[in-house]
Each structure stands twice: as C-alpha cells, then as structure tokens.
Image (cartoon, rainbow, N blue to C red):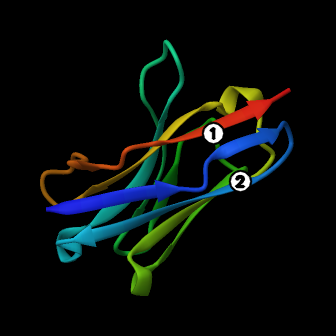
Amino acid sequence: QVQLVESGGGLVQAGGSLRLSCTASGRTSIIYAMGWFRQAPGKEREFVTTIRRTGETDYGDSVKGRFTISRDNAKNTVYLQMNSLKPEDTAVYYCAARGLYPDTYRYWGQGTQVTVSS
C-alpha cells in the first residue's frame, strides 16, 4: 500500500502564495501519477493538477497559470506551488496517487486546509 502525508496548508491573504507538500511512503514503486484535488464546503471535489512518472502535467482550468506541480523523486515528494491565490481557492487540498492501471486515484492523503482571505 501507499501512504500519503500532506503539509503546508494555512491562512493567506488574497494575492499571496503557499506551497503544499505531499510525501509518499510504502510501495512507492507502484506510483505512476500523483495529483492534487480540492474540496470546498458544499462543493464537489475538484481536480487541481497531476504529474505523471513521465513528467507530464495537467492542470484544472481554474488554476492554470497560477499553480505549479513539481516533484522530488529522491524524496518521493510532490509539491504544489500556489501563487496569486484567490478566496475561491479556499478548500481542503488532498494529495492522491495512482498506479498505471486502473487510472483512478486509489491512495489519498488526509487533506490540508488552505484558506484565502479577501
């Protein structure tokens, strides 16, 4: 199994920046992609970004140009750099991981709260 632990959430003013980290442990060799999702109160979970083993990345439309995902393979860690934060970015951010098949995220972290004040 794979365990994921997020860190780096907090309170920031609009226009500010935060960096989230997610460290994987356990059977990390099976991980093909890691990503970030978020869920705001009363809303459905939303895809934020993903990075594959190949290095390819995808971003949700609402964060393109503001958020950047990166990774440190030696540390089994992915980072989410969030710039130009908006109040609508307020949510619990979850790290997730999946193998190559099936292409659904099977492993999830506990979540970290990000709050952006106006």
Residue 56 vs 62, above or below: the answer is below
| Tag 1 secondary structure | strand
Around disc 1, counting alpha carbons within 10 Å, would you say few (fewer than 14), some (14 to 19), or many (20 or more)? many
Residue 53 vs 89, above or below: the answer is below
Amino acid type for the residue under numbered disc 1? Val
- Of residues 101 and 13, the one nearer the viewer is 13
Side of 82 relative to 5 (left or right): right
Of the numbered discs 1 and 2, the one sitting upstream in the chain is 2
Q: Position of residue 21 (x, y in %)?
A: 53, 62
Q: Is residue 99 visible?
A: no
Amino acid type for the residue under numbered disc 2? Leu
| Tag 2 secondary structure | strand
- Residue at point 63%, 39% (across, down): 114
Q: Is residue 43 visible?
A: yes
- Residue at point 13%, 62% (across, down): 1
Q: Position of residue 81 (x, y in %)?
A: 66, 59
- Of residues 10 and 104, the one nearer the viewer is 10
Q: Which residue in the protein does label 1 denote? A: 114
- Residue at point 41%, 54% (across, down): 35
Around disc 2, counting alpha carbons within 10 Å, would you say few (fewer than 14), some (14 to 19), or many (20 or more)? some
How far apart are the alpha carbons under marks 1 and 2? Answer: 9 Å
Q: Position of residue 55 (x, y in %)?
A: 44, 73
Side of 80 relative to 1 (left or right): right
Q: Position of residue 82 (x, y in %)?
A: 69, 52
- Residue at point 33%, 58% (across, down): 4
Q: Which residue in the protein does label 2 denote? A: 18
Q: Are marks 1 and 2 in contact (CB under 8 Å)?
A: yes
Which quadrant of the rendered structure holds the C terminus? Answer: top right
> How many marks overall?
2
Residue 2 vs 16, above or below: the answer is below
- Of residues 51 and 86, the one nearer the viewer is 86
